[in-house]
Image (tube, rainbow, N blue to C red):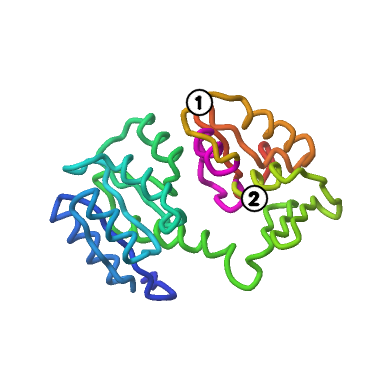
Amino acid sequence: MNQQAVVAERVLVVDDEPDIVALVAYHLAKSGYKVSTAASGQEAIDQARAEKPAAVILDLMLPDMSGFDVLSKLRDDESTRNVAVLMLTARRDEPDRIRGLSLGADDYLTKPFSPQELVLRINAILRRLSAGKGAASEVLKIGALRIDKSAHRVTVGDQDIDLTATEFKLLLLLAERRGRVQARSHLLQLVWEAAPDIQTRTVDMHVQRLRAKLGAAGELIETVRGFGYRINSGHPRGA
């Protein structure tokens, strides 16, 4: 069955192999997406800033910089911070996959790949990201956890949770990027506005306090050893 995009959203395909670009672009266009292409990291960054695509399909091996560097720049830029990113690469090593996810990639697909699977993954990523948008975007619900952004109110079930301003900001950031691993250095920059090279246990201590205050819902916050934290899809660990 043909998986048509609900809206003609734009996808930026970044790869320096013309055959790969043509193959991916063809299947995305066939599924209803608008497609842009870039053959280098800087070109990708410039186009992402100018076009604000819904998603970027990003190869790791680019002629001018690595896909990791491109991803970092996209996540550090306010205008491209929330764009969906699927890493597309010939590398199968787990450390590369973990590094990509820790930098904020939404998914990871290795070459050779099925074009149909790639389109399905893009569809799934965009559906997941759009689920938290719309009229009810001021309220995030993940399992029993409910975050009212405008009221700065957090509840678990029918119980109000008393959080400090920093704890609320940290929880909201993780919730808005659920499923994505957030590196400690990145959290320090965004929540505490600290330099990324500061070595501190501040993030770990706040996560521990958050988990304690949230009770059973605290298990939604997962530790990714050696990298940072993420909030999962809505089911506490072991559920």
Q: Please name the amino acid that badge 2 sits on.
A: Leu
Q: Secondary structure at mark 1?
A: loop
Q: Is residue 45 magenta?
A: no
Quadrant of the rendered structure where residue 221 is?
Answer: top right
Horizontal placement of 2 versus 59: left or right?
A: right
Q: Is residue 183 magenta?
A: yes
Reply above or below: 78 against 213: below
Horizontal placement of 174 versus 151: left or right?
A: left
Alpha carbons under labels 1 and 2: distance apart: 22 Å
Q: Position of residue 237 (x, y in %)?
A: 66, 37
Horizontal placement of 106 versus 139: left or right?
A: left
- Provide the residue designation for mark 1: 226
Q: Residue at x 18, y 53 (%)?
A: 39
Q: Main secondary structure of the magenta part?
A: helix
Give the magenta range: 174-191
Compare residues 5 and 155 and report the one nearer the observer: 155
What is the quadrant of the C terminus in the image?
top right
Q: Please name the amino acid that badge 1 sits on.
A: Gly
Reply above or below: 205 against 217: above
Quadrant of the rendered structure where residue 7 is?
Answer: bottom left
- Provide the residue designation for mark 2: 172
